[in-house]
Amino acid sequence: MKEFIDKILQSDKTLAFPIMTHPGIEALGKTVKDAVTDGQIHFQAIKYLSENYNTVACSSIMDLTVEAEAFGATVSLPDDEIPSVTGRLLSDAESIAALEVPSLEAGRIPQYLLANKLATEAIKDKPLFSGCIGPFSLAGRLYDMSEIMVAIYIEPNGILQLLGKCTDFLVNYCKALKACGTQGIVIAEPAAGLLSGDDCMLYSTDFVKRIVKAVQDDTFTVILHNCGNTGQCTQAMVASGAKALHFGNTIDMEDVLNECPSDILVLGNLNPVGVFKHGGAGLVRIETKALLAKVGKHKNFVISSGCDLPPHVPEANIHAFLETVEEYKN
Amino acid sequence: MNSELLEKLSECVEFGKINLLSPYPPQMKGQPGADEITKEALESGVTPTEILNDALIFAMNKVGQKFSENKIFVPQMLLSAKAMGASMVHLKPFFANGTVQRKGVFILGTVFGDLHDIGKNLFGMMVEGAGWEVIDLGIDVKTEKFVEAVQQHPTAVVGISALLTTTMVNMKPVIDAIKAVSPSTKVIVGGAPLSADFAATIGADGYGKNPQEGIVWLDKILA
């Protein structure tokens, strides 16, 4: 952690870390389903991106279903779309009480561990960040996202119990990812951004803190991602103890950087859909320049996509982004 | 007395007090909720139309406004919608026999290929709270199902939701098919990855960045 964070804080240039794996999957001629079910293909996609794009770090797939599937949720795995949880695994206090924390052998977890292990063995010139879902977002996938939003007020004790079980699993999973040799983890907690700041603190931050405490040290950085936050959750994100925070495109990065301590890395927040996927290279350059002009002066700022890049982002747009960042440096 | 009941009901919906047993909001714990107060209001002679217009629509409008101003968030909004639903249960017979007229029919669904429903559910509840009859087709709704629903309800407005960048592109064939059988049918789209520009390029008549924007658009097309 220290080395990665020091490198950024001491750099006189803004560094780029777009969260992406789909462009690598597509470059290999593989489908999303291939990559999320086969650790070898997943690894090859990470390696391709690491070798072909000048980024400060690389990341593994942000698959927000793999942990829920390990708990027993059913998952839809279309060929060329990101996976989705289908149905509802838990519906009441009894089913929460009966829920068992799964082992790391469940579902596709072994394939994700394999991909991370192979990637850390092969990529030596830049850090690799693993990915996992956040506790509240995982609980929402198990209990139903609409229902958990209501249940935090109607059945708060049951939801807190569920969050405890989700966190037990995530701590184990993050420790295993760390043992693969990765340099950090991106914890994706988008559903917490639908909550008020106080609720985010109670139903997300308090549990994220447990993960941070279990894995973050000088060799391993936690990046907490919350693309749903429009500003109300920023202090709750800071309170997690994560040394890096990643923001979505709906937030004003100037406000965020003014609000966050200067020793915490702040990453974000170009629109992954409107700019990277549907915009042309020209729009990518304009938006990248505008963001750099606005907040590039902050030493703790890392320019990134506001969320992971979706499938079918034109390669030319990623190159336009990285070239623009490079030009700004010079 | 009647205005007091309408005021109480409005407060229950605004603050998400569903029924007597519901512990939320804490300051109203142990008090009757939208369920009981609606029943009492009807028994006291308050008309269903007054309940709908002066309590439910009035309260949900305030809820939508507070949500768009980031004063409340998704859980509070869903609780308000649940409270409204508890009241609506008592009004259903009056909708069915024509005593109460709603603004129109709104057909709603998440586009085919997409299994997400929170945005759709939120918007559906807000539309119902704005005085429309909502026909929720669910998630992963095929084009033919939308078309069939439009043919059954020719004056309906259609809402299509998508959360994924890979499924938002499925909205255009649905809109094309709806317009082919019913050119005058209005279609509004919404979902996290969408934008007003994208909505225009796929031939949607409206776009809602948030539920309240969608409600404002619906009110406009009625005017």
Image (cartoon, coloured by chain):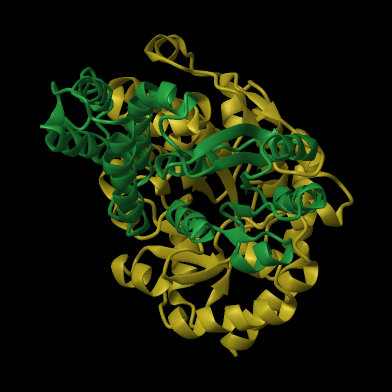
Question: Is B208 left or right of B73, judged from the image as shown?
Answer: right
Vertical placement of residue A56 versus A75, above or below = below
* Image quarter of residue B45: top left
Q: Residue at x 43, y 24 (%)?
A: B92
The answer to whether one can see residue A104 in this image is no
Image colour for chain B is: green
Residue B157: % across, % down: 61, 47
Q: Nearer the viewer, residue B107 or A84?
A: B107
Question: What residue do we see at 64% from left, 45% from top?
Answer: B155
Establish if A290 lies above or below A19.
Answer: below
Residue at point 78% right, 40% down?
A: B143
Question: For this rendering, which residue is in front, B14 or B150?
Answer: B150
* Residue A27 percent coordinates (x, y): 85, 57
According to the colouring, which chain is yellow? A
Front one among A260 and B138: B138
User: In x, y percent, where is residue A87?
Assistant: 60, 23
Tell me: A30 left or right of A168. right
Q: Residue furthest bottom?
A: A330
Q: Nearer the viewer, residue A166 or A127?
A: A166
- Residue sitting farthest toward the right: A29
Q: Quadrant of the N terminus of chain B?
A: top left
